[in-house]
Amino acid sequence: MTHHPCPGFKTAGVSAGLKKNGRRDLGMIYSETPAAVAGLFTRNLVQAAPVQLDRERIKSGLCRALVVNSGNANCCTGEAGRLAAEGMARAAARGLGIDEQKVLVASTGVIGLPLPLDKVEAAMSGLIAELRPEGVMDLARAMMTTDTVPKVVSRRAETDSGPFFITGVAKGAGMIRPDVATMLCFLMTDVSASPEQLQRLLAAGSDRSFNRISIDGDTSTNDTVLLMASGVSRVDLKSGGARRLFEEQLNEVMLALAKGLVKDGEGATKLVEITVKGALTDRDAMRIADTVAHSNLVKTAFFGEDANWGRILAAAGRAGVPLDPQKVDLYFGDVRMVSGGVGAGAATEANATRVLKRDEFTVTLDLNMGAGHASMITCDFSVDYVKINADYRT
Amino acid sequence: MTHHPCPGFKTAGVSAGLKKNGRRDLGMIYSETPAAVAGLFTRNLVQAAPVQLDRERIKSGLCRALVVNSGNANCCTGEAGRLAAEGMARAAARGLGIDEQKVLVASTGVIGLPLPLDKVEAAMSGLIAELRPEGVMDLARAMMTTDTVPKVVSRRAETDSGPFFITGVAKGAGMIRPDVATMLCFLMTDVSASPEQLQRLLAAGSDRSFNRISIDGDTSTNDTVLLMASGVSRVDLKSGGARRLFEEQLNEVMLALAKGLVKDGEGATKLVEITVKGALTDRDAMRIADTVAHSNLVKTAFFGEDANWGRILAAAGRAGVPLDPQKVDLYFGDVRMVSGGVGAGAATEANATRVLKRDEFTVTLDLNMGAGHASMITCDFSVDYVKINADYRT
């Protein structure tokens, strides 16, 4: 993955000894100017200490730095956890010589173990010394838990006022739904924008990306998405043209990161887009797409490269929305496997199986009832998923 | 498992060649008298042909025979599927010399393949020849798909009017939630009862058994539970004393069968009862128990014998009901692992891990908010589950 550094920001990632294997586990984003900031946080009622801290601090709309660690979620850690989150921010603020209220924090890893703040403090000066415009891959690595590759996506775009940049970094989710496996995403840009503008753009972009790989209410204890704008470019989102171009680029970056999370889902070997059309409403279509995309039986069949369309119809049938089984058509890629609720037979299934052998493919359900449509991005469900999650803490 | 034959009924199971491996795949229950009958069927909108047929025929409240096959679900098979379901019943009625409208049918197996009616017809006279009071184990075997053991539970109880019997046979579900893997359960008794009485008892018993291992709307295309009463004993449920004893015994049979399904869940190695108490309402407690019991991350941790209580709290936190994380206590067996949302540390966890090494254990969440409570029965989620379901049709 090639990427652009984002003007106004320096990044770094080092090892603080939080991970048992000695890999990078402490990262930082530093903004040379007070950056405008917007954030989306988990809706889980069980919220990690860093999430609780950030929710308060982000109200100012300004941010100078973010400290993130992997290897420990600092969640269900009580009062000590709150002090540890504050301590992480304070150590960063002291080292950088900035207001600690302008420092945000994020954590990911095992829930319920005390965060060893002393290790974070001991590593802080080394982390700050590593800060540089090109440090984003190190940052991405420092955020990884069961991710197998760092995820960085960036865009450069030209406006009448000059270029702007967006650089996003993310860490992944257990399987498709960011259940307990935390999703973290930090987006940096050099445009000028108000926190309110950023918040609207971030929420809209999430609906087209991260919310298509998860569902409301199914968030982890630590999920955090932040968008920071340094304002050091000449591009201001007050201009409608710049705003539209920025929104388009931001959505592309977020969708690419979301797909990256699914591709690197725990044990995943396939990227599958589930599209539902012909539903009575978009909302109905989304509920069916979501039910199919989360069905263990559907996902294990994808892993087995088995065109088991009956499981897909059965999942659709229990989604809780209107559906006439005798009207449903189902496609694997372009292969029409089911017409009017009845399978096309062995010859067609051989063609469908060829589609399932690809690394990426689409499944389309046409309910033939209305104009509602929606799609979800999912992955298959493999033996390795179970192995990873059975042994996660050992 | 020891069991009693149920007076008034004969049962059998033979091989009709529907399964590739030559095992039993065609079973029958025959009632020597017109039995009163009640049924519960899948609420999935995609319903197999036998379910559609039974829903109509059961309206008469009387039943003389049931024919069941495994190896093919006769679902999503269109008009041919309807004709095959009717054909199964007709072949049985002809062989038995009874009204075909009084014959019910059930199927389980792969969805979407045509049911080879000719094989069923060819095997029918042999099946009928095998009918005998003690044939229930053969029947249970003929219903199995990925089940590893036949499931039969029976009770004999004494009343003032003499004894009565209940004999139930069931086949299982993929993992805990009977998603696409069909749950079939057939209960025979020799008491006298009206179809309406039987329906009420069956619905109430399901809420205490099968509905605690699944959730509303999450049913497969073929799920069927039938209760048949031959009335050949002297016990009549018009008597309040007999009715209460019968209800108690019926509930015990159904719960034992439900637990048997979970124990034999695909790849399952652990039986886990998730109890939630201290919720504001029973309904809230059930939603949390259900969310925890279905969490892949929780269930893979059970498989790994890992007391990963953070995943349990996180699942509770996304159940969509009120919860104060700082009030929650969590127990593995009798070991209090979490108090007020904070973990008890490594020494206690060692004790908790010993609980998880058992074949059966309980997990209790106390929200300390109110008097609502509920429990769910679940199993762990193993590597074998994925293997079984990836390769199911091959």
Image (spheres, coloured by chain):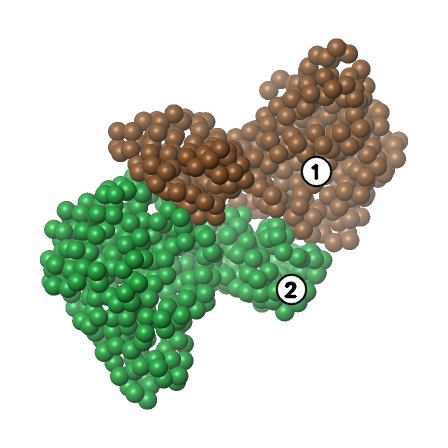
Chain colours: A green, B brown
CA distance for labels 1 and 2: 29 Å
User: What numbered label is drawn on residue B40?
Assistant: 1
Q: Nearer the viewer, residue A234 or B254?
A: A234
Vertically, is A156 above or below A328?
A: below
Which quadrant would residue A157 be assigned to in this image?
A: bottom left
Q: Amino acid at mark 1?
A: Leu
Q: Give x and y (percent) for residue A387.
A: 38, 43
Task: Specify the subunit that label 2 lies on.
Answer: A
User: What numbered label is drawn on residue A280?
Assistant: 2
Q: Mark yes or no: residue A175 visible.
A: no
Vertically, is B138 above or below A270?
A: above
Residue visible at 61% across and 65% down? A281
Vertically, is A333 above or below B292?
A: below
Q: Secondary structure at mark 2?
A: loop
Residue visible at 34% across and 80% down? A237
Q: Nearer the viewer, residue A138 or A199?
A: A199
Describe residue A199's horizontal placement relative to residue B249 as left or right: left
